[in-house]
């Protein structure tokens, strides 16, 4: 298995304890939650079941019965409610001779259908029986991260404070994707790995689709732009699997996709044509929890002035190139290479990759041990033009790193014109910072920088190679 050492170690620690353990594993769809649990325990479960997508209570119970029969309860009768279903699970566990009874229920959010009484039955199963068994380990998993958090981790009822272990599974880093690509024999350069990451993010399931012997561009043509491309229709499946009513969530990310630097809550409401109704906050929180957007607090501003941006690489790629019929050309990506559209996307996508690897940037700047906070910033330059800085690293050692991120195919040469733009942003930022703070300009570039008269003004340099370092 590539990566996931920390997560596997934690699961094994919980499995080796002498107490009842209730473990929640959650994360974005396709991030590898099921694979993590199955590989860690090599299929050595007492019982294993996966909920079914978009079916009612009767079929959920029918599927649960089938799993009970498969794992040893051969005479399980027809189930009519979840109390009976968990009672049969108790009998199965009692009859198992394993030292540690590991029960794994995958895609649990799908099992909680309307008026099914699933959550109270789960509460009764755990509180009334399983939690008293020192040999019991219950692992629940689901892509609907908001459901796991609301109904399990932040449950106000019978499951309140019952979870003994939780694992929020994050996408792969660039380094992990590089290792995964090598394990599959893709033989990609780091520039190719970076470009794949800019479209696929660190989602292992997507990387698994890349075929040997094909360049990233050829793979993108096949996956995104061919009539039956595996990722051409993933967007609808992705959001439908996570949210019972996907429309407002899709509306939000679609609106944010048109604004490179993000929107505040009020700006988003106006641009999307949404009424507040008290729900927009919940929508944003759930999208953030699921890893689709990030909430970036503006420097020196209150939380309510936070800017929301899309952080999910696949979503950004889909909105720009596939949505609204843009992907009808079967050679759509190959034809776009080296065009203005390509470089416009690449610049924004590379910025997102940098935002996803802030820790690597900090290590490259040798400030890994310094306490920091990351912000965006909007202001007015001295000439009256808008000034936007996508990433500021505010350090507690008196420095604010103004990070400028540039994606180029070849070595990047800082021009006088570009340095003047950076200087205007720095001057605008200076006007709102306390005198005790110094500003350092940091260039983060996909390729090494050409040293010239203007590069001498830059305080520190970070390249894409640094982003591959953990």
Image (tube, rainbow, N blue to C red):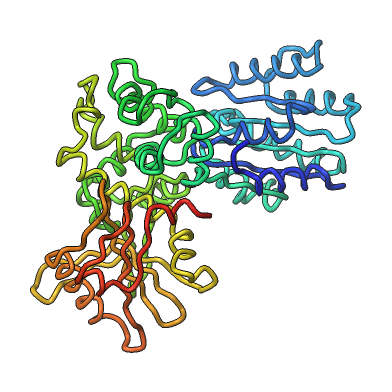
Residue 249 seen from this side:
no
Would residue 258 be found to the left or right of residue 393 on screen? left
Residue drawn at the location 66% of the way across and 49% of the way down = 6
Q: Does residue 130 appear in this view?
A: yes
Relative placement, left or right, of 210 versus 413 is right
Q: Residue at x 70, y 18 (%)?
A: 67
Q: Is residue 344 left or right of residue 173?
A: left
Residue at left offset 77%, top offset 43%: 127
Q: Is residue 455 left or right of residue 277?
A: left
- The percent coordinates of residue 317 (x first, y second) are 30, 37
Decide: is 400 above or below 13: below
Where residue 448 sits: x, y (%)? 32, 56
Q: Quadrant of residue 450?
A: bottom left
- Image coords of residue 367 (percent x, y): 48, 71
Residue at 30%, 57% in the rendered image: 265
Q: Is residue 276 above or below residue 95?
A: below
Residue 400 percent across, percent down from the top left: 36, 75
* Snapshot quadrant of residue 52: top right
Q: Residue furthest bottom?
A: 435
Q: Nearer the viewer, residue 74 or 25?
A: 25
Q: Which one is nearer the viewer's eye here, 364 or 431? A: 364
Where is residue 152, by image quadrant?
Answer: top right
- On-image quarter of the N terminus: top right
- On screen, 244 above or below 405? above
């Amino acid at each position: 298995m590539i990566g996931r050492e920390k997560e596997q170690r934690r699961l094994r620690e919980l499995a080796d304890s002498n107490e009842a353990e209730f473990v929640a594993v959650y994360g974005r769809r396709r991030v590898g939650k099921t694979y993590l649990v199955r590989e860690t325990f090599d299929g050595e479960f007492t019982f294993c079941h996966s909920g079914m997508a978009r079916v009612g209570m009767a079929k959920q119970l029918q599927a649960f019965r089938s799993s009970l029969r498969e794992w040893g309860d051969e005479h399980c009768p027809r189930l009519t409610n979840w109390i009976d279903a968990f009672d049969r699970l108790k009998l199965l566990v009692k009859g198992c001779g394993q030292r540690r009874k590991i029960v794994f229920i995958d895609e649990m959010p799908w099992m909680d259908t309307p008026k099914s009484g699933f959550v109270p039955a789960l509460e009764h199963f755990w509180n009334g029986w399983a939690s008293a068994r020192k040999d019991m380990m219950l692992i629940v998993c689901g892509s609907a991260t908001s459901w796991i958090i609301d109904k399990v981790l932040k449950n106000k009822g019978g499951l309140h404070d019952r979870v003994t272990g939780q694992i929020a599974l994050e996408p792969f880093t660039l380094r992990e994707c590089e290792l995964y690509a090598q394990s599959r024999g893709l033989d990609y350069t780091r520039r190719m790995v970076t470009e794949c990451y800019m479209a696929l993010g660190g989602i292992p399931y997507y990387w698994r689709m890349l075929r040997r012997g094909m360049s990233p561009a050829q793979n993108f043509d096949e996956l995104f732009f061919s009539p039956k491309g595996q990722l051409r229709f993933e967007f609808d499946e992705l959001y439908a699997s996570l949210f019972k009513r996907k429309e407002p969530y899709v509306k939000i990310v679609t609106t944010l996709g048109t604004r490179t630097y993000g929107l505040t809550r009020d700006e988003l409401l106006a641009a999307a044509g949404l009424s507040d109704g008290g729900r927009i906050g919940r929508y944003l929180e759930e999208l953030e929890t699921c890893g689709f957007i990030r909430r970036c607090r503006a420097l020196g501003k209150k939380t309510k002035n936070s800017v929301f941006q899309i952080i999910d690489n696949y979503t950004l790629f889909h909105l720009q190139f596939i949505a609204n019929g843009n992907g009808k050309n079967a050679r759509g990506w190959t034809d776009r290479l080296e065009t203005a559209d390509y470089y416009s996307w690449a610049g924004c996508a590379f910025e997102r990759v940098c935002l996803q690897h802030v820790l690597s940037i900090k290590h490259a700047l040798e400030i890994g041990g310094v306490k920091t906070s990351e912000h965006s910033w909007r202001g007015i330059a001295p000439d009256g033009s808008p000034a936007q800085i996508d990433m500021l690293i505010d350090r507690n050692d008196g420095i604010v790193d103004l990070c400028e991120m540039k994606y180029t195919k070849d070595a990047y040469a800082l021009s006088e014109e570009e340095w003047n733009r950076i200087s205007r942003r720095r001057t605008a930022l200076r006007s709102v910072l306390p005198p005790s703070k110094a500003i350092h300009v940091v260039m983060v570039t996909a390729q090494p920088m050409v040293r010239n008269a203007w590069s001498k003004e830059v305080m520190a340099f970070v390249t894409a190679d640094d982003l591959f370092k953990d």
